[in-house]
Image (cartoon, grey):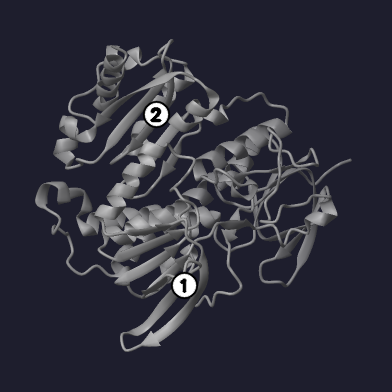
Amino acid sequence: MAYDYDIVVIGSGPAGQRAAIQSAKLGRKTLLLEKKHVLGGICINTGTIPSKTLREAVLHLSGYRERGIYGSSYTVKQHITMQDLHFRTDHVIRHEIDVTRHQLQRNKIEVRTGNGKFIDEHTICVEDADGHGQRSVTAANIVIATGTHATRDKKIPFDGQRIFISDDILTLEKLPRSITVIGAGVIGIEYATMFAALGVRVTLVDKRDTLLPFIDREITDSLAYHMHQNRVTLRLGEEVSSVEPTNDDKGERVKVVLASGKQIVTEKALYSIGRTGATESLNLEAAGIATDDRGRLKVNAHYQTNKSHIYAVGDVIGFPSLASTSMEQGRLAACHAFGTACESVPSLFPYGIYTIPEISTVGRTEEELTQDGIPYEIGKANYREIARGQIIGDNTGLLKLIFNLETRELLGVHIIGEGASELIHIGQAVLAHKGTIDYFVNTVFNYPTLAECYKTAAFDGINRLG
C-alpha cells in the first residue's frame, strides 16, 4: 500500500521533535502534528523550560547562591514579584520556540497545526486547530508523543490563582507569603524548594513516607534537611481529605484538611498529584490501542505499542518522564521503525532534578544493591572540602560514588549541590565503559573545580577498603 507519509509524529515536545528529526535524517517523508499554535509542547511552554528558567531567576534574584558567603539576609532584589520572575521566563520560551521551529525547517519536516485522531491503525484525521476543517492522511508508521497534562481532582475547586496546578504558575499575579504544595513528586518538590528560596513559608504534603523513592536515600535525606533549613514543613505519610477556599479577617486563603485531622491554612495551594496521558482526543480505540487508568500507553523495549507500527514515546508512556529521556526514546523509536541500527543504555540514563539544591543521579542506588545482594562500598566528597565549593559558597553539596567491593567497578554516582546535573556526566561516561574508581584516582582534574569531588570521593572509598 502506498502511504501519504513514511511516518506521522503526533506531538511536538522533546520526544516528538527528536522522532521527527531522526526520521527526516533517514530520508523519510515526515509529518509532525501539533494541536496548539506554538511548537514545543508542555516542555517549552509550561513545563521544563519555564520551571528551570523560573528556578534560575529565583536563585539570582534571591541571592541564594551567595548566602553561604554574604549571610542568609543577602538578596539581589529586596521585593521580588512574579513579574520579575516572568521577565526572564518569557524571553527563554520565545527563544526556544524559535530554535525548535528552525530545526524542523532545516530538516524539511512538514509541520501541521491540528489535532490528530485515529480513523484506523494507519489513517489519521487531522482536525484544524480552529475547528474549520479536517483532512485524512495515511502513514506507514505513527509515533504518539502527546505528553501529559496535570491530573485534577474533580472535587477541588481550581481557580488558577488560589488553588492551581503547575501549568498555572506562569499566570500567577503575585507571590504568596505562604503556600501548601500537595504532592511531593519531581514537579511538586521542585516548586516547593523554589518558593522556599524566595522566603515563602511552604508546607509539602505527600502520602508517601519518603521523598523521591527512586533516588538514593542519603541524597533525599540531605534534601529534606536543606528544606527544613529553609523553613519547609514536611507532612509525609499524610493524605489530603479536602481543599477549599476560605475567607477570614486575614483575607482570601485556602484550607487544606488532612485525613489525620490536621488543618493547614495558607494563601495558596499548588496541586501536583501526578500527570495524566494526553490521549483522550486520539480515538485510540479505532487503532486497537488501550491506555491504563492514567491515560498512559504501554510499550515494549523498542517503544512499540501492541500495534507494531505504532510507537509511543515521552511522558505519555510514564516513568521517568524527563525531557532528556524522552528525546532519546523518540530517536530510538524512529530508528527502529526504519530498521536502522542504534544503541542506547536506558539503565545509564541520568536523572536531573532541579530542586534547590539540585540533584542528579546515574546508575544503582545503595538500596537497590542491598536488595540484590551485591557487595559494595561508597566514597564521598563534600563540596566544603573542595576549593571550588568554598569559592562559590556551596558548603552543603555532596558527591557519592558507589563501587563494587571486589572489582572496584563503578556502580552509581549520586550528587546533591550546585551543578549536579552537569557534574553527573563524568560519572556517566565511566559507568558506560565499566570503569573503576581507580580512574578518578589516576586522573588529573582542573583546579579549582567541582569535578575534583570525584578524586576526593575515590580516595575516600579506597580508604574505606582498609
The answer to whether residue 95 shows anywhere in this view is: no
Say whether residue 153 is left or right of residue 199: right
Between the C-alphas of marks 2 and 1, the distance is: 39 Å
Q: Can you say whether 338 is above or below 432 in the image?
A: below
Residue 130 numbered mark, or none? none
- Callout 1: SS: strand
Task: Write down the residue under mark 1.
Answer: 257
From the top left corner, tell me how far across and down residue 446 is, in percent: 22, 23
Q: Residues within 10 Å of mark 1 (few under 14, many from 20)?
A: some
Give left or right: position of 136 versus 347: right
Which quadrant of the figure contains the N terminus? Answer: top right
Q: Is residue 40 visible?
A: yes
Is 83 left or right of 335, judged from the image as shown?
Answer: left
Tell me where residue 216 sits by quadrant. Answer: top left
Q: Residue furthest left?
A: 70
| Relative height, residue 283 to residue 461 (above, below) | below
Query: Which mark is in front, 2 or 1?
Result: 1
Label 1 amino acid?
Val
Task: Indicate the position of residue 422 as horizontal and vertical percent values.
Answer: 35, 36
Quickly name the residue at label 2.
413
Marks 2 and 1 close (CB-CB < 8 Å)? no
Residue 70 in the image, given as x and y percentages of width and height = 10, 51
First along the sequence among labels 2 and 1: 1
